[in-house]
Amino acid sequence: MDDRSAIPLDSETKVAERPADHETELRLWLRLLTCTTLIEGEIRRRLRDSFDVTLPRFDLLAQLDKAPSGMTLGELSQRMMVSNGNVTGLTERLVEQGLLDRRASPTDRRAQIVSLTAEGRRAFRSMARTHEDWIADIFSGLSAAEIDTLMNLLAKTKASTRKAVTEREAP
Amino acid sequence: MDDRSAIPLDSETKVAERPADHETELRLWLRLLTCTTLIEGEIRRRLRDSFDVTLPRFDLLAQLDKAPSGMTLGELSQRMMVSNGNVTGLTERLVEQGLLDRRASPTDRRAQIVSLTAEGRRAFRSMARTHEDWIADIFSGLSAAEIDTLMNLLAKTKASTRKAVTEREAP
DNA sequence: GCGAATTACTTTAAGCTTAAAATAATTTTC
DNA sequence: GAAAATTATTTTAAGCTTAAAGTAATTCGC
């Protein structure tokens, strides 16, 4: 007999039938997803209304702002956790908009290095200041201690996820 | 002279220069986003590899599984937190796939009610069981207590976000 | 060095997603 | 009960996103 279901997690009378229902984890995942969707949607809306920029473009600019000498497309794609083709398209539009510079790598003729133009940097910095205030506003219902705890638990979640992914890839 | 670096992180002696840098909240948001992106990507990949289904379709089926008598498109769009047009398209494809039924509302001629077909219900239930195990696996690095704390902090985050959104809409 | 494997990127096709405008039906207001 | 406002949905155009296939350059193995 499988007695795992007899462990009094929240429930009282789990019958043997179903091995172990991981409803708790599922609810956690749904809540995590809801939070992110909610915040992401709000930020997307504000970026569009205030600066007429999309969130993916803002994200790309943010990555480049952290790398003054630029970055290859592959590096961008890794840091943004999106596909290569995605970065190709985003970059094209931002170059066209005059916010990005694109040049061939001096050491590798396959690679392209993109970096912010002066205008791109100026535009991003200006948006970033407001963006930071929005985020602070959104999290203002949490105390410093709660933010700290949340940070740590999310770090654990990230580690746990990576482990699950890795172990499945190389079993 | 730039004395920002001399200011203790959350001190109250904010010098005039830079009002308040909310770097902590920004880092929290980025971490939250990373977690979700990581998990979402993995689940999307597994759903495709194992069941040849997309995540949005799975999500729509999940909503309908919870409403045995069906739901209007508008209700679906609200619960899934996506646009109306999005639901229109997803529904079309799922009806075409034979997983959804779609009928006019008897009380409101503008509205359509969609519900799972027998096949749709069977297909979803089968996928859902595996899906739940994946989620449990992904969160397996967290203890029950940690999961509980995380749940509560995310509830707070959600509430704080809704407050920020609402107050901006109706100031 | 030479062929094989890998790497960086682009292209393609399909699907997802949104905002905004349009359509049609219902409800509210006077 | 007619006009005005709201609601439910669809359509449209633009952009995002991915997986998979393709191209070109580099590195590896010998």
Image (spheres, coloured by chain):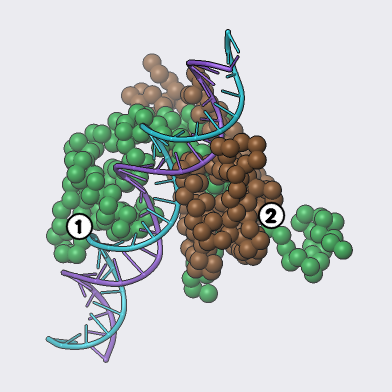
Chain colours: A brown, B green, C purple, D cyan
The vertical placement of C2 against A29, above or below, is: above
Q: Quadrant of residue B10?
A: bottom right
Q: Amino acid at mark 1?
A: Gln
Instruction: Please identify the quarter of the rendering in which residue B116 is found.
Output: top left
Q: Nearer the viewer, residue A112 or A125?
A: A112
Residue at screen point 52% across, 51% down = A91
Contact (CB < 8 A) between labels 2 and 1? no
Dot in front, 2 or 1: 2
Point out residue A72 in the picture as x, y percentages from the top left corner: 60, 42
Q: Position of residue A154 (x, y in %)?
A: 59, 41
In the image, residue A18 lies at what x, y percent? Answer: 35, 26
- Label 2 sits on what residue type? Glu
Give above or below for A117 relative to A161. below
Residue B74: quadrant of the picture: bottom left
Query: Hey, which residue is sitting farthest right in the picture?
Result: B1
Q: Mark 1 = which residue?
A: B112
Chain holding disc 1: B
Q: Chain of mark 2?
A: B
Is residue A102 rendered to the left or right of residue B24? left
Residue at x 49% of width, y 56% of height: A93
Disc on the earlier residue, 2 or 1:
2
| Residue at 18% across, 40% down | B98
- The residue indicated by pointer 2 is B23
Report if residue A87 is visible in the image.
yes
Q: As rendered, which of A165 and A33 lies closer to the eye? A: A165
In the rendered view, does A65 fall on the left or right side of D10?
Answer: right
The secondary element bearing badge 1 is classed as strand
Measure how far apart labels 2 and 1 are at the Cα level.
46 Å
Whether residue B165 is visible, yes or no, is no
Mark 2 residue element: helix
Check disc 2: other Cα within 10 Å, few if <14, some if 14-19, many if 20+.
some
**A121 or B145, which lies in front?**
A121
